[in-house]
Image (spheres, helix red, strand yellow):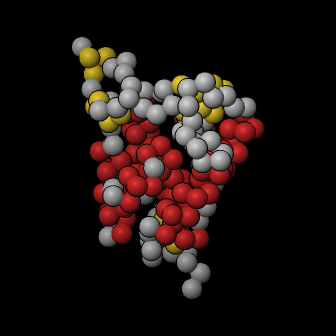
Amino acid sequence: MSGAAPAVRGLPVRRLAAALVLSAAGLIAIVEHEGYTDTAVVPTRNDRPTYGFGSTFREDGTPVAIGDRTTPVRALRTVQAHLAGEEQQFRASLPGVALSQDEYDVYVDFLYQYGIGNWRNSSMRRHLLQGDYRQACDALLLWRRAGGYDCSTQVQGKPNTVCWGVWQRQQQRHARCLQAQ
């Protein structure tokens, strides 16, 4: 068995998640959304310090601390090292599940931001294990909190200034996921 689901008039081509890896476009989307900083910052209230492309851990696995610095090349290596381990765990968490490349990239993007523990306990994963692809996409919108704050909240009809970007990113993931259906 090749692990590929046959294409049927306009339906996405899906392969077993175990056979997929993050695409170059998926990696670019992650680093683009994360943005780059050469010095550690706290991106949203009550978050951990990050540097590079949103990395909370250095290449050696120790936590990033305020005052730490990186370079663009080191930052990309850190992203790659982080994803290598988490992608392996991600694929193992979806036994027998087939995904399109676009779906895979969306969920790995989520994984990069929220971590493997949150992925394993997510309703997205449960829906995928049941074959409910649309419900898995919709469950992305449940992840709208950062630092104890509901990032989808508007203040006087305008986006909040605390973490609106977190909510925008979830909406973008949701739209990309739906387009992959």
The reply to whether residue 171 is visible in this rendering is yes
Q: Is residue 1 left or right of residue 119?
A: right
Of residue 69 and residue 114, the one placed in the foreground of this image is 69
Q: Which image quadrant: the N terminus?
A: bottom right
Tell me where residue 151 sits by quadrant: top left
Q: Which image quadrant: the C terminus?
A: bottom left
Of residue 37 and residue 174, the one placed in the foreground of this image is 37
* Above or below 10: residue 56: above
> At x 35% / y 34%, what residue is drawn?
146
> At x 51% / y 53%, what residue is drawn?
108
Question: Extreme right residue here?
Answer: 73
- Residue 133, given in percent of the width and then of the height, sits at 37, 61
Tell me where residue 157 sits by quadrant: top left
- Residue 113, given in percent of the width and then of the height, sits at 47, 43
Question: Extreme left residue here?
Answer: 156
Question: Extreme top residue here?
Answer: 156
- Residue 41, given in percent of the width and then of the height, sits at 54, 25
